[in-house]
Amino acid sequence: MNYEDRDTYGMYKDHGTSEPGPDQRRGPGPEMMGANTLVGNAVYNHQDEDLGDIKEIMLDLRNGTVAYAVLSFGGFLGMGEKLFAVPWHALTLDTLNKRFVLKVEKARLEHAPGFDKGHWPNMADQSWAREIHSYYGTQPH
């Protein structure tokens, strides 16, 4: 399911205009989007492999930034799934396919530092943050 399907406020709705031009857009996206509409979006890698979907978006309230997307990978019907905190800057929005792209091999993601839904890490811990950013090749904010 993509952001347009979860748009309860109509911010991405086509209001009858023809194809939007540079000065006509359908809502605030893709440069500005509602966080709730992004939960559930698919994440693929650059080889077009399905890596899972976004379960949560973590905000850093001290800095006023989006810090991580929590990605669910593996498992079946929620059983055995592993969660990963992926630095927000490691994701790219693919507006054509209405999904996110994470430039990481599927096998590498399988071995990434992760957690299960009953054991969330302390994401404010700076040593944990350095480990995660190092793994994905991003810089902490």
Image: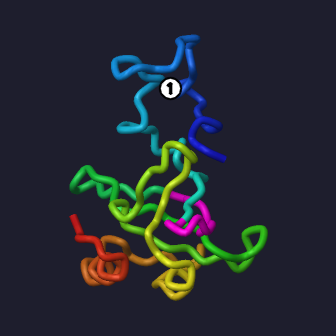
The x, y position of residue 47, in whole percent, is 55, 69
* 68 left or right of 41 in image: left
The colour scheme of the drawn protein is rainbow
- Which residue lies most toward the bottom here? 111
- State the extent of the magenta-drawn residues as a range: 45-56
Residue at 37% from the left image edge and 66% from the top image edge:
87
* Residue 54 painted magenta: yes
Residue 67 vs residue 41, the one in the foreground: 41
Mark 1 residue element: loop
* Residue 50 painted magenta: yes
Residue at 57% from the left image edge and 20% from the top image edge:
14
Q: Quadrant of residue 107?
A: bottom right
Residue at 62% from the left image edge and 38% from the top image edge:
6
Q: Quadrant of residue 127?
A: bottom left
Q: Amino acid at mark 1?
A: Met
> Could you tell me how many numbered marks the image carries?
1
Relative to 29, residue 65 above or below: below
Label 1 crowd bin: few (<14), some (14–19), many (20+), radius 10 Å: some
The x, y position of residue 18, in whole percent, is 53, 14
Can you identify the residue that label 1 sits on?
11
Residue 128 vs residue 22, the one in the foreground: 22
Relative to 7, residue 100 above or below: below
The x, y position of residue 88, in whole percent, is 37, 60
- Which residue lies most toward the right here? 77
